[in-house]
Image (cartoon, rainbow, N blue to C red):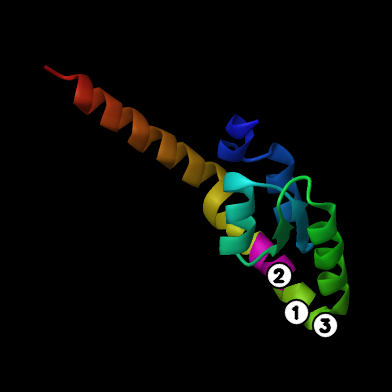
Amino acid sequence: EPIFALTIPGKLQAYLITGTPILAMLNGEGADIVERGQAGLTCPAGNYQALASAVLKLHQMSVEDRQVMGANGICLSDREFSRDHLIGQLEAWLKGLHEKCRP
């Protein structure tokens, strides 16, 4: 469903904080986060051939490269999904809505 491309699976946040490279068969915002954060490899949902290629690519990477991906995931989690960041973002959105609704 197209709506799922706009959401971030909750388990993605849990995976990022583990420091393990992410291998995701995922579309949309979730895939964009993994790619932008250089925290792992992605392929389109339902594309089993691309998933197999991604598995092989991850396997062929050096341990150091995989460790960098894992560290990137931790940094991404801290930067984007920390409690303080999320509350600050929510406060900013609410403040913006309040200002729009003022007469």
Please state if 36 lies on the left or on the right of 9 as rendered.
left
Q: Residue at x 16, y 19 (%)?
A: 102
The residue singled out by tag 1 in the image is 65
**Furthest residue to the left?**
103
| Magenta highlight range | 69-73
Quarter of the image with the N terminus in it: top right
Mark 2–mark 1 Cα distance, whole angstroms, equals: 6 Å
Q: CA distance from mark 3 to mark 1?
A: 5 Å
Q: Position of residue 18 (x, y in %)?
A: 77, 56
Between the C-alphas of marks 3 and 2, the distance is 11 Å
Q: Quadrant of residue 67?
A: bottom right
> Which residue is found at the position 67% from the left and 61% from the top?
73
Disc 1 marks a residue whose amino acid type is Asp
Three-letter amino acid code of the residue under disc 3? Ser
Q: Is residue 67 magenta?
A: no
Up-down relation of residue 44 to residue 4 (above or below): below
**Are dots 3 and 2 in contact, CB under 8 Å?**
no
Question: In this view of the protein, which residue sits in the foreground, 61 or 48?
Answer: 48
Identify the element where label 1 is drawn: helix
Label 1 crowd bin: few (<14), some (14–19), many (20+), radius 10 Å = few
Question: Which label's residue is closer to the chain start, 3 or 2?
Answer: 3
Contact, mark 2 vs mark 1 (Cβ under 8 Å): yes
Q: Is residue 94 above or below residue 30?
A: above
Q: Position of residue 17 (x, y in %)?
A: 71, 54
Circle 3: element type = loop
Q: Label 2: which residue?
A: 69
Number of marks in picture = 3
What residue would you read off at disc 3?
62
Dominant secondary structure of the residues highlighted in magenta in the image: helix
Asked if the residue under mark 1 is in contact with the one under mark 3, i.e. CB atoms within 8 Å, the reply is yes
